[in-house]
Amino acid sequence: MLPFVLEKANNTEAAIASAAAGARYIAGGTTLVDLMREEVERPDQLVDINALPLGDIRVDGEDLVIGALARMSDVATHPDVQRLQPVIAESLIEGASPQLRNMASMGGNLLQRCRCPYFRMLDSACNKRAPGSGCAAIDGLNAGNAILGTSDHCVATHPSDVAVALVALGATMRVRGPQGERSFPVEDLFRLPGNTPHLEHTLLPAELILEIRVPSGPHSRRARYLKVRDRASYEFALVSAAVALDVDNGLIRSARIAVGGVGTKPWRLRACEAALAGKAADRASFEAAAHLATDGARPLSHNHYKVELLPRTIVRALEMAGEVA
């Protein structure tokens, strides 16, 4: 690990000022410290933001509000989260080991870097790590890479599980930076790689995530997260699906579907959602809608299996949501 300077911020204004001067925010450090150890990330200065009052979990009207510094474990076990948005708790438990959940913050989880193996191999071409160097995954070992939202410059998947659930639920986030505060959908945080895959999010320089706001609705009760992976725990998704259904007398009034493990960002499937509206909440409807999930898919040499696995995962997740009493 290369030398760096660490300072601690006692208030939000001081943290933002340090970031504006070139420091990187650090909270749980579960991703950043690993990347610094491997010299993939090489910040000269870090600002510890753990003392900031951004760890609350509360209910505001009909919204669930989660502070950016709330630990994944605290969110997953919070009674209001389990009562109002159980799919968030489910995605967090599926997303990391207990040790990591105890350390990792919600804001940091959304901003974690990709897990494409070539990103961490300093002797391999990776446009995320070294812009303009190429993408070794396109013609390399790419079984875990994306089939949706890819470009000729990058095929890495976004690794966050809870981000998939938040996108499905239409969550928003509030951020603050040198130019003030703004709010926007969590879905809009993530960029497609295009020809600039090193630009992964839409935060402006020195902007700090303050909180995540999740609106409630009739779909929230029938919501499930399903993660398909190579082993039962501590593994990233091959395919995952967060789904939520509003069902009345056996008919679907509305549906929310987002998937992970297949896209370069958490992937909302609005065509599948529209196909379910007004249909019976049964397997035939689920299969017909899920068939649309792979439109535009660009499988690589080793991940064509995801084209078949993705619809099957969606169907099973919808069945699980439909079984919720």
Image: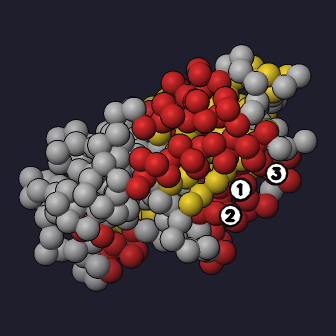
> How far from the left and from the top, in percent, is residue 316?
66, 48
Compared across the picture, whether 52 is left or right of 280 comes to: left
Tell me whether circle 1 and circle 2 mark residues in contact (CB < 8 Å): yes
What kind of residue is marked 2? Ile
Q: Where is mark 2, residue-wise?
A: 93
Label 2: which secondary element? helix
Q: Where is mark 1, residue-wise?
A: 90
Q: Going from the N terminus, do you reach mark 2 or mark 3 first?
A: 3
Residue 63 appears in the picture as rendered: no
Tell me whether circle 3 and circle 1 mark residues in contact (CB < 8 Å): no
Q: Residues within 10 Å of mark 1 (few under 14, many from 20)?
A: many
What residue do we see at 35% from left, 53% from top?
Answer: 304
Q: Quadrant of the N terminus?
A: bottom left
> Which circle, 3 or 1, is nearer the viewer?
1
Compared across the picture, whether 148 is left or right of 161 comes to: left
Mark carried by residue 82: 3
What kind of residue is marked 1? Glu
> How far from the left and from the top, in percent, is residue 108?
50, 57
What kind of residue is marked 3? Gln
